[in-house]
Amino acid sequence: MRRWNGWGDSSNEYPLKSSGLRFLQSRLGGATPLQDAELATVIATVPDTRLPAHPLIQTDPEIRVRHARGQSLPDWLAMRSGDFGHFPDGVAEPENSEQVRELLDWAAEQNIILIPYGGGTSVAGHINPQPGDKPVLTLSLARMNTLLDLDRESQIATFGAGTPGPLLEQQLKEKGYTLGHFPQSWELSTVGGWVASRSSGQQSMRYGRIEQMFAGGRMETPRGTLNIPAIPASSAGPDIREIVLGSEGRLGIITEVKVRVTPLPELETFQVAFAPNWDVAVELVRSLTQSRLPLSMLRVSNAEETRTHLTLAGHEKLVSLLHRYLSVRGCGERKCMITFGVTGEKNQSKQTLAACKRRIRAAGGVMVGELLGRKWEESRFRSPYLRHGLWEHGYVVDTFETAVNWNQVTPAMTAMEQAVRDNAGNGEAVHVFTHLSHLYPQGSSIYTTYVFRCSDSYEKTLQRWQAIKNAAGDAIVAHGGTISHQHGVGRDHAPWLKHEKGQQGMAILEELIHAMDPRKQLNPGCLIQDDSETATL
Amino acid sequence: MRRWNGWGDSSNEYPLKSSGLRFLQSRLGGATPLQDAELATVIATVPDTRLPAHPLIQTDPEIRVRHARGQSLPDWLAMRSGDFGHFPDGVAEPENSEQVRELLDWAAEQNIILIPYGGGTSVAGHINPQPGDKPVLTLSLARMNTLLDLDRESQIATFGAGTPGPLLEQQLKEKGYTLGHFPQSWELSTVGGWVASRSSGQQSMRYGRIEQMFAGGRMETPRGTLNIPAIPASSAGPDIREIVLGSEGRLGIITEVKVRVTPLPELETFQVAFAPNWDVAVELVRSLTQSRLPLSMLRVSNAEETRTHLTLAGHEKLVSLLHRYLSVRGCGERKCMITFGVTGEKNQSKQTLAACKRRIRAAGGVMVGELLGRKWEESRFRSPYLRHGLWEHGYVVDTFETAVNWNQVTPAMTAMEQAVRDNAGNGEAVHVFTHLSHLYPQGSSIYTTYVFRCSDSYEKTLQRWQAIKNAAGDAIVAHGGTISHQHGVGRDHAPWLKHEKGQQGMAILEELIHAMDPRKQLNPGCLIQDDSETATL
């Protein structure tokens, strides 16, 4: 069963290996875990619902607990402490667009706040009920999870918006197709959520971001139904798709999504190489990306992430051999791991693979064969579980990310990491490392992970996190980065949005929301910090 | 000097060859040209300006004549007849964003309508002054035509919005770069115009549509300056770029454009093949496109277009030899010409070329070498001149276009052509032919050209065109096509926009315009037929 207070199914466990624990202890000092709350205790804190009865709405406390929080660090601390803050007054799980429409109209009559809920995987506070006088209904799309149509000739599949990654790929695979959207949240996140938050998957180099996959669909808005036809390309005015993308539940509820799919690839391989240091690694991946070589995936870890990954992987003897081999080949302490993927038609893929290896070697990189690539593939969705393994030992892990142009990649990364190191308070050490995982000819995403010790209370642990988060957000916007490359804005990133969009850009977003949802019943406070809401919160 | 009443520089002449004339006469019957007006006669019809004096504004009649019309068929008839309808009251040619800002603020104070003007190449009535009580100022970006910045590392170039195609490529070429945006209007159209109208170029398969190139920039709006930062990708809410794209002067005046550029390619080749018939040709180009083979260009002409092009090309003996050769190889009367391009790094391009040729031959196509490909390249921007050559003999040519999913390509094309044939009135023949020139895994653009005889007056010739245009627009939306794949909406396509955007989509566009330009001073009637405007027109 899915965990009520953490990531994934409770049968999936990935405890921290002893080599990893020793490594963290050496970096951060020993740590003491905080006490977890029990589900029964939390259920007992759920207040009576304020919702009128409705046949599509469930109001029992457990379902309200299970839909109250996402997967941000504040969410985690809330769930582990048992201090949830606010719960939805009820949860509806409609089966089709018509029931969504019915609930939307009913909510308008009853003056109820609606929060659309996909997989509940937000790491930015997208789905958290806010305090206020109005009852809050969380509208889960979980039951709208099937392939509704497949146009093979045009390679367009239509899905219910609540279809999660594995179910989506499974239904496509049966027909010989794939979408190829693999965010780290893939096990739980949904196609509607990907659209609403402008998600990006690990193989975006081949398949594109969700923006390139999203061909059209249906959104129920307070003003009526918005149908977006699937047209290959259009010059007919501003693109409505691009307004729905990233709308984070504020303009309407996405109920059906048409996506561009492709036949299953003939060949797919992931490979690992090492570069002697960061500067060589970045120059290499930039030149690979700008060469337009059709890779499906490319990522590079900085030296600290490379060291951390190899240590946390266990297999101490093998890893030690690897270090020695790489050292002889010129990749020592400062080495950086590069992982890349090739996916597609057989001949073309083989040519691409050969060309990529040539370029890596010419740039001073060292190929290490497919084994580490397969390891990456096996564990590609495992990172979210890491928080569990660390937590048990008193450590907290979180991540943040941005994208900047190439001329800012290294300065931004350096500043982001330094902001983390400098802001845990009282000289507390933080272990921080970074990778680039979505590379574009123009620039790259930057994804930073950091681990710190729990403080002696939940409240102080949250404060430690908040200080780091604030400093990281400031460092990002100071370097011209987006406030989020792949996680969306939610409530946690909203304070920085104005730096990216500017005054007029913010005005456009506010007007859009006002136009579609003048009474601000849809997910208020998400994406845009409405003045009126800020006042009431 | 640029023609005041037609396309391009007056030194460029491409008269109709005798074989082409005979061919059209056999299809349509003999025709009688209409009488052209003289520039001096038109200048004499220009009324006094209604604008207050302003140091940045010119009001002499000739400049007002030269900025009154675009390049649509109604524009052509207006210019040739000398009956222009309406003129702008003046033309400003600001040199920088600050002067645009000054004019915008001044226009607000003085209650003046502003029409942004790039290259004046619209074929959909984007820049035509409308009747009304308020004075009209056309704001030409012509003097903002330089490369302002080049970030080589991030491959981002910043241009003044009024930079036309040749000047843009020349400035980039000097630095070793290209944008690669080559619409047929390239000789005259501007980078700001491409953004404002969501243009697509002939090599969009490699370089993308202008949407993929446009990284950010600056727009002066009635509310203030909108700066869009150039970020490689972002999940932070709806994309403001995608609201500026296609805004057609209604939200503000684009003054600076940041575009994604690439180093000049090592290799570029265009090649021609033939397929025995349309069905084989479409299946072949669809499979090529869906294979993701990195071609830079791909187009296919239907049998009638193939026949017409080969006949109009002249070189009767050579063409006759070609027909015989192809006939022996199985490509007879119904043959369709396929043109494709490969552009990029040398080795990769050679592999792509070889793979493409293999696929063409395997599908029953016949390669005919590079000569015809080079011919296409030489004449790639020549089509707009064709109107001149035909007009002298009493024939009128126009085009329209859409994009549909693959499952609609042939039905839509058939219906579009039939709509043209059936609607010239009184059994008048129309010569109509079609190509697909922007191919996507999801579907394709459809570009139809038609030639008909002038009637015995300008008025009746315009009526003949209007009947065809209306029927074509209806056929497009009946097949789920976009009302424009690459020409924008303007005023000519606005009546059909609601079919593509739907009621809620239209509401979003109306709200955006209202939010940015509440007094409707920017290009009213373009893109959206405002109720209030419709009433006053």
Image: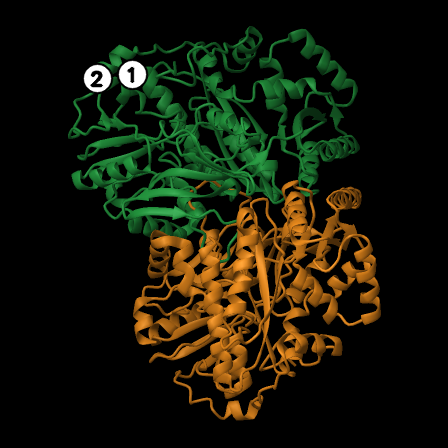
Chain colours: A green, B orange
Q: Inspect the image, locate mark 2, and give the three-letter code of the amino acid beneath it.
A: Thr
Q: Secondary structure at mark 2?
A: loop
Looking at the image, is A138 positioned above or below residue A532?
above
Q: Label 1 vs label 2: CA separation?
A: 9 Å
Residue B369, given in percent of the width and then of the height, sits at: 82, 55
Residue A532, given in percent of the width and then of the height, sits at: 24, 44
Q: Nearer the viewer, residue B479 or A71?
A: B479
Q: Nearer the viewer, residue B143 or A219?
A: A219
Looking at the image, is B531 positioned above or below residue A80?
below
* In this picture, residue B497 sits left or right of residue A317: left
Query: Is any part of residue A532 visible from this angle?
Result: yes
* In this picture, residue B434 sits left or right of residue A128: right
Q: Nearer the viewer, residue B310 or B499?
A: B310
Crowd class of label 2 (few under 14; some 14 to 19; many from 20; radius 10 Å)? some
Query: Is any part of residue A410 visible from this angle?
Result: no
Q: Which residue is pictured at 47% across the width and 66% down the height?
A: B471
Q: Secondary structure at mark 1?
A: loop
Labels 1 and 2 share a subunit:
yes
Q: Which mark is residue A402?
A: none
Q: Inspect the image, locate mark 1, and give the three-letter code of the amino acid beneath it.
A: Gly
**Label 1 chain ID:** A
Q: Which residue is pictured at 56% across the width and 18% down the height?
A: A379
Tell me which corner region of the image, top left, top right, bottom left or bottom right, holds residue A474: top left
Verify CB contact (< 8 Å) between mark 1 and mark 2.
yes
Quarter of the figure that contains the N terminus of chain A: top left
Residue at which label 2 appears: A45
Query: Which circle's residue, 1 or 2, is located before the other in the chain?
Result: 2
Crowd class of label 1 (few under 14; some 14 to 19; many from 20; radius 10 Å)? many
Residue at which label 1 appears: A82
Q: Nearer the viewer, residue B373 or A324?
A: B373
